[in-house]
Image (tube, rainbow, N blue to C red):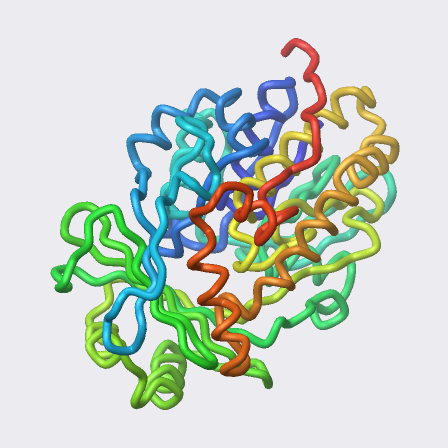
Amino acid sequence: MRVLISGAGIAGPTLAYWLRHLGHEPTLVERAPEPRRGGYLVDFWGTGFDVAERMGIVPELHRLGYRLTEVRSVDRHGRRVASFAAEAVVGLGDRYVTIARSDLASATFSALDGCVETMFGDTVAAIDDDGGAVHVRFESGTRRDFDLVVGADGLHSRVRELAFGAQERFERYLGIVVAVFDVAGYRPRDELTAVMHADVGFQLLRVSLRDDITMFCISLREEGGASLDSPREQQALLHRRLAGAGWETPAVLDAMRSARTFYFDRVSQIRMPSWTRGRVALVGDAAACPSFLAGQGSALAMIEAYVLAAELAQADGDHIRAFARYHERLGPMLRSKQDAARGLCSAFAPRTRAALVVRNTAMRLMGLPYVPNLVMGRSLRDGVELPALPAA
């Protein structure tokens, strides 16, 4: 089958890899002119790690990623509030890595080894599914026909909008915005340590990366939702809302002006009754974004891509049956992940002083046996078994 996949992040290249492995003809289209840089760090483990292992990219993930040794929370004066070994949270040995989302995307894309047609600097403008094929018009004006179209184009999916309706029908905003940026030469540095400071309404995270780069992540409670179009407006919001904040916040906001990369978005979930319609399907954040708070969106995207490819193979080209099995297999797990993520809002941006106290108490307990499972619960378990793939 000829399959158009919109989005060359993580879900898209993973799906393209497995479709090509199974003898199909995938085509990737990506709005950006080249692979994207920047973005936040993700903790990568679980069933998504199994997919990466089957793709042969785990050594590259370990090369690009990090093994953090400590997670530390400090108060507004920099005094230690809580500290625990990062390994205590997941306890997975070599089957765990902390990695920049863009590096994970780069590794999945590199696995295609140049054997999948990729169209950078273009995107889908119109879709006409006549039941027998999908007629696609691209923004460049090019028109092509495909057997299937898959939207792997993220939270603000264009394919989802064209095939299912406006984003506001499916987006559930969680009352928080997130900003992620990296800066060269910032001091101080705490190697292989995630240092964070939380106060009412926000959390600031600092992680030292290689090559003297430091990544910052700010999660800020913004009940109305920030519809700010430019980085200038977004950074002005951060300066305005965090004026007078403690710890290194003033220095971090000052360093933000010279950031190499800058990412800003609402923290939202996508909740849909179905991820497929006709010959169009969605994967990754386009289908069931669990939100930045879940910490596993990238791994889940790889699981979804693998399962969709496997179901198409097992259905022997019957996309209707494959799409139904795809949703049936993953729907309960993804809803569980989304429910668990909603419960973490107060950890990333405490709403009240009482919520801050609860958050700090939980942080102090995280290094104790069994506590991570009690605190994070379902977010540490995938609850899905990968289906077998037929021989290529």
* Location of residue 106 (image quadrant): top left
Residue 81 higher or lower than 320, as above or below: below
Residue 158 higher or lower than 22, as above or below: below
Residue drawn at x 55%, y 26% is: 50
- Looking at the rendered image, the quarter that the N terminus falls into is top right
Judging depth in this view, the residue of 363 and 236 nearest the camera is: 363
Residue drawn at x 46%, y 81% is: 200
Q: Is residue 58 left or right of residue 305?
A: left
Residue drawn at x 50%, y 35% is: 45
Residue 351 higher or lower than 375, as above or below: below
- Using the rendered image of the protein, determine whether residue 227 is visible from the camera's viewpoint: no
Q: Position of residue 194 (x, y in %)?
A: 31, 54
Q: Position of residue 91 (x, y in %)?
A: 46, 34
- Looking at the rendered image, the quarter that the C terminus falls into is top right
Residue 94 higher or lower than 380, as above or below: above
* Location of residue 207 (image quadrant): bottom left
- Using the rendered image of the protein, determine whether residue 12 is visible from the camera's viewpoint: yes
Q: Is residue 388 left or right of residue 212?
A: right
Q: Position of residue 196 (x, y in %)?
A: 34, 64
Residue drawn at x 30%, y 89% is: 244
| Label total for image | 0
Judging depth in this view, the residue of 316 and 64 nearest the camera is: 64
Q: Is residue 209 left or right of residue 226?
A: left
Q: Position of residue 170 (x, y in %)?
A: 74, 65
